[in-house]
Amino acid sequence: MYSIIAVHGLNPRNKNASEHAWDTWRTPYGPIGHLWLRDVLPQSLPDSRIFLYQYNATAVYSQDRDTFIDKANELLEAVRIEREEIESRPIIFLGHSMGGLLIKQALINAHNNPKYMTLKDATWGLAFFATPHNGGDWKLVSLGGIATKIAGALGFRKGDNIIEVLKTGSMFSDIMQEHWRHRLLDYSILSFWGSLDDAVPRESARLGLPGDRENIIKLDADHIGVCKFGTSQTDLDNLKLVRANLRDMYKEVLKKHSHLPCHYTPLAENKRFTGREGILYRIEEMFLCRDKYRKLSIVGLGGIGKTQVALRFAYWVKAKHSEHSILWVPALSSETFEQAYAEVAKRLDIQVGPNEQDLKESVQQYFSSDEAGKWLLILDNADDIELVLGSSGKLSGLCKYLPQSENGIILFTTRSTEVAISVAGNDVVNLQEMDLQEARSLFERCLVRGGVRPDENEISELLHELTCLPLAISQAAAYLNRNKMPVKKYLEFLRGTEKDILSFEQIRKSDGVAADLLAFLSCIEPKAIPQSILPGAQSEETEYAIGTLCGYTFLVRRGENNVFDMHNLVHIATRIWIRQSRREKEVTITSLCHIEKLFSRKMKRREYKRYFPHVFRILDESKDQLLQERFDLFYKLGVCLFLESRCKEAMKAMEKSYKWNKYHLLDNDSFRLEVEVQLAITYTSLGLSKNVIEILKDVVAIDQIGRTKKSRELLYLGFLLGWAYVMEGGVKSIQRAMFPEDSHDRLFNVEFVARAYRFRGHIREAMNILERTVAMRKTFPPDSVSRFDPELELAVAYLDRGYVRKPTQLLDHVELIAETTLPEEDMTRLYTATYLSDIYINNGRVEKAVEMLEHVIDVYKRTQPEDYPRRLIAEKILGNAYIKCGMATKGFELLDYVMAMEAKK
């Protein structure tokens, strides 16, 4: 996936800015014009997102040079915001006329501003249409004159202020200086010029670069027509040239981007790292002999420094062999593994299918191909043999999803010798304790400088007592720093009867909130802990407690982010402390209830994805706790997994909640019904029609008796159940068994069975069912659920078959029923009116659609918040309707508003 961003140039007088942004690229002017960027280019350039950038083009070209620079920064900021979380996606800029100069200025600004450096690095191609570069002399003595010619071609006249400003050429004073000329070498460049263009001739439309750096293409067009193409043969010939050259650029960009390295190392470089030169040298030598070594293992005791050695090696590769992608993948659980793969897939725009297995397989396949280039993958903390190798021990666990390529090397860190040998054979590096000199160097680096220097003999004694383990050394130094304690006193506590002062119990006595945090942390994953998941996350007490735990190096902050890591040994020790204090059950239940409550509030996608590993962990830790909160959390996790298209995992989580609720909640309990409906929806997405029938036939029966749900929701359940019956092929007989022949409920269900047929492409069967249903319902009172729903469905079916008159008559009747039988604020009426309006637009009745939608939105404004989803849908349809009936400014303003509201979600 990559982005194409089109930037227009000077705006003629009195022309709306929105209209000009579109009309620059379409012909004829107005909404009915042919917009090749939308109608033609996507078919030629797959996997592209195409944007039109709009700005006040008249205000840009003022006598104030800063205005031009500011407008260039506005372009950068607009692009940056649009590309959040996809910063590496490649960009091709298209610029017409003076818009090309704005692009150039923006890239100069980006080069000088670290905030936009990733945007500059992501820009791979530039396509200029009649942009006045002024040839290859790299001076601007005549650019002001050319600019006035451009203004004249666009309709400006002598005496206009902008003509006088452009004559001076002040705004162009440094665009083409030597530093910009060197920047050009970073990009693939196309320069299109018009043979009929009197304003920007060929010499001005080219940059004057060598032939392999700039491709200059002549089009049979004037200055305005050089970037817009209609249906004439001349325009079609021009478009063919543009498409072919943009296609070539696309292929070149794709080829370059495919080998762009991805450096994913979420852990910051350890500036205090010292020693281990021999081990690092050996690993580096093995890395350089890639023909011999494909998989390496670092094995050693917990706390001995395996992760830090691997991290040091990763940053060495990044510095010395930057052409390698680096993937840091924690193997603490399946979820941490998948989360790392998801981040890599996002950074590299790896296309992923809808199922949860697709993510791991897609990343694996990408890095197994030559397209990925060279890479290093580090599987850290690969300690659980069953997780890593699978229950059979035949590389069926996480190893099943590791890539295989002659261009790649995999490094494992593990406490298990069995894992190390199983994955790497004899290519195993045993990490031993530090020698005394290395341990002393680490201790001194960790101590805060200043004060009395510790006695050398006391340091040696302490290091011997700590068996030279790096983790123990770091924590001892942190304790000494925090408590300003002499080494001699620390040794006394460590050896003597008062050694409990160094224990978790001491933290509990000195900082109760920190002790409670430790207890909570023992129940979740020890890595990638977001501060927001902690109890009392934003309180001053929690902030202080985090500082306490970081001071003792029990927690380590990732750079400046509010994300923390805990060493595995500290995590294990914390769990032992909780167990010894006989608080394991209490802590587990408290932690479970906190996370369940946390999931009760509405979360953004980015947030709940960060919580996944911790939710999985607490659910596993609490498996012996038969609490309603645990099964409520299973359901909420299932909903989030479903939103991520991880449907099989979502189904398993929801099924646990469903089975628990079935025996512990009443049949008509609202939460139980909610879980059952959502599980049925999940079954539907997986095609498990028998499961849908098993659940929903009881739910529908309960709803018919108790009417615990609104009629629209009951109809939706009928649709799901009807779909399941259609899939099972026994619709008619089962329908008769469930409902009496003349009951409303049977007719409701038949209607949704018809919709299921339509969705499956059996339009004629759907029409037959709906025609009978509509005929029967003519005898019913005209109300919101028995008349216009089937007529609306039948109208849609007619439209699918290409009919015109029949659906129009039905739609008119549906509208009349809605207006005369339902209050204007009725949600069903508003929804139906929105649906009708969309059909009217597609049927050529745009003005009628505008009238209906304006009324719908007026009602929504009185009754619903501005971010209500159905209100936004109606506003989006209305915006498009405005554009189609010639009110483009109004339409674009409304669409911009909708986009802004959706971005807030």
Image (cartoon, rainbow, N blue to C red):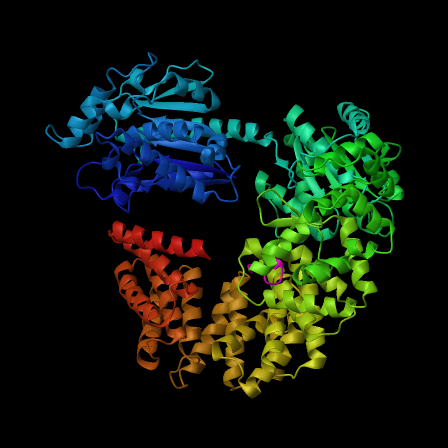
Depth check: 92 or 846 in front? 92
Q: Within the image, what quadrant is residue 17 found in?
A: top left
Farthest top residue? 137
Q: On screen, 131 above or below 675?
A: above
Q: Residue at x 31, y 56 (%)?
A: 881
Farthest front residue? 452
Q: On screen, 162 above or below 760?
A: above
Farthest left residue? 159
Q: Residue at x 76, y 37 (%)?
A: 454
Q: Is residue 397 left or right of residue 227?
A: right
- Across and down, in percent, residue 146 comes to 23, 21
Magenta span covers which residues? 533-539
Q: Is residue 532 left or right of residue 117?
A: right
Determine if the magenta segment contains residue 10.
no
| Residue 355 visible, this orientation | no
Q: On screen, 798 above or below 324?
A: below
- Across and down, in percent, residue 618 comes to 71, 62
- Across and down, in percent, residue 783 comes to 39, 82
